[in-house]
Image (spheres, rainbow, N blue to C red):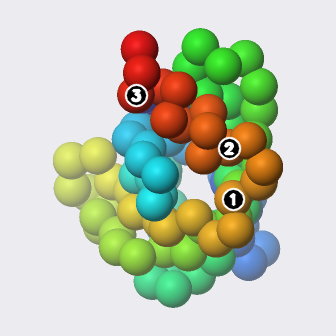
Amino acid sequence: MGAPASLRWGKQQISGFVETINLAGMYVTAPSLPELGEYVDAVFSLPRIGRSFRVRASVVHTRPLGERRTGFGARFERPPLGFLEAIKGLAGH
């Protein structure tokens, strides 16, 4: 997917990319990584939707720095109204 994202956790605020997304969560590539279990706030736009979403997710796995596509997988926590429907719409195209 490659959607640019603004990411925040703890005192960190960085930019990354949402590479894959489904109804449960997302994989984000980023230059630095949160800890397992940490909550991340992300703001990004879904392709073909034209609307930005702010979501909160908990980190469930990480791919360490130096490996291909360094990043983390995160599970959505109480996604905002319309967000899951927008993801379902991506699968329909």
Q: Amino acid at mark 3?
A: Ala
- Above or below for 13 versus 11: above
Residue assigned mark 1 = 79
User: Which quarter of the image is occupied by the N terminus?
Assistant: top left
Q: Nearer the viewer, residue 54 or 4?
A: 54
Report the residue that reaches farthest toward the left: 68
Instruction: Estimate the spatial distance between the alpha carbons at disc 2 and disc 1, rounded to whole Å.
Output: 6 Å
Q: Nearer the viewer, residue 73 or 69?
A: 73
Q: Is 90 located above or below residue 13 in the figure?
A: above
Task: Specify the quadrant of the image occupied by residue 36.
Answer: bottom left
Measured Cα–Cα span from mark 2 to mark 3: 13 Å
Q: Which residue is mark 3?
A: 91
- For disc 2, the marked residue is 83
For label 3, the SS is helix
**Callout 1: 10 Å neighbours few (<14), some, many (20+)?**
some
Q: Residue at x 38, y 41 (%)?
A: 20
Which secondary structure lies at badge 1? loop
Discs 2, 1 touching: Cβ within 8 Å: yes
